[in-house]
Amino acid sequence: MSWQLRFLGVGNSQSAPVLGSASAVLERDGKPQLLIDCGQETLTAYLARYGQVPQAIFITHLHLDHVGGLERLFYTAYFDDALRGKIKLFVPAAIVPAMQSRLADYPGVLAEGGANWWDAFQLIPVSSGFWHAGLQFAVFPVRHHQPDSAFGLRLPGSFIWTGDTRPIPERLADGAQAGELIAHDCGLHGNPSHTGLADVQRDYPASWWPFFVLYHYASSADAALMAAEGFRIAEVGQAFELTPPEPGPLA
């Protein structure tokens, strides 16, 4: 049994049309298990890769470059009896109210009436973690805009996905010590809501750097400059082999 983390997109909000919306898929033996985020470019990339819509999605936060594809997915699912109400949305409980107001409260989700936003999905609010596909995932808050507005994801033994964040060494220490792949938000230059290359070099021990894979950058040129500093940079469509999760999946 093999495990991979495949990047469907690696760009920030401005570069998403070229580099794809930042998102990834956990694969087992090449088959999709869980999509992380669904920005405006994500669903197209997912359909091209797997030939079907995602069955389970974890949402890190509510900026549209991470959830903008959900409206299209709503229409796809709602009008398909085999999909309606069956696509799992794992959403941190702290952001469910904002998700309701941002996506679900628009009056008349269908012009004909008679439909609610959530009819198309199975909402699963999560706090510190959740079970999916026999695996136990951990969820943790990150540093992006307001407190408790953005969250990361960890599959112990395999990988950490930071989502959009400033440096969070206190959150990543256990995973780094375990040698897990750490997919980290990083552009060439940081700002009050995102990590930059200098932040990584200053705030994380050099012994952790080999485990990092950087994504959510502004351009291929910026990626090349970060790679020249010795960091692994995720590219669109690239899959990274993972250590099998611990403990292994339930039967």
Image (cartoon, rainbow, N blue to C red):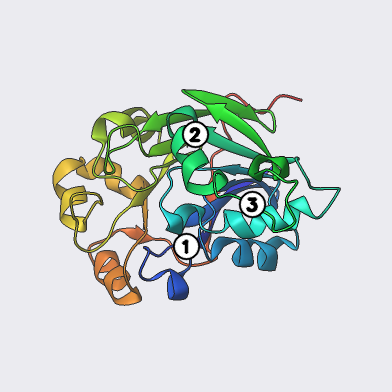
In the rendered structure, the answer to whether residue 61 lies left or right of residue 59 reads left
Residue found at x 34% / y 31%: 177
* Residue 180 percent location from the top left of the image: 43, 38
- In this rendering, the answer to whether 243 lies above or below 231 is above
User: Label 1 is placed on what type of residue?
Assistant: Ser
Q: Secondary structure at mark 1?
A: loop
Q: Residues within 10 Å of mark 3 (few under 14, many from 20)?
A: few
In the rendered structure, the answer to whether residue 198 lies left or right of residue 220 reads left
Q: Nearer the viewer, mark 3 or mark 1?
A: 3
Whole-number angstrom distance, CA of label 2 to CA of label 3: 20 Å
Whole-number angstrom distance, CA of label 3 to CA of label 1: 28 Å
Residue linked to disc 3 = 108
Question: Do tag 3 and tag 1 residues touch (Cβ < 8 Å)?
Answer: no
Q: Is residue 138 something that shows in the picture?
A: yes
In the rendered structure, the answer to whether residue 51 lies left or right of residue 65 reads right
In the rendered structure, the answer to whether residue 246 lies left or right of residue 140 reads right
Whole-number angstrom distance, CA of label 1 to CA of label 2: 21 Å
Q: Nearer the viewer, mark 2 or mark 3?
A: 3
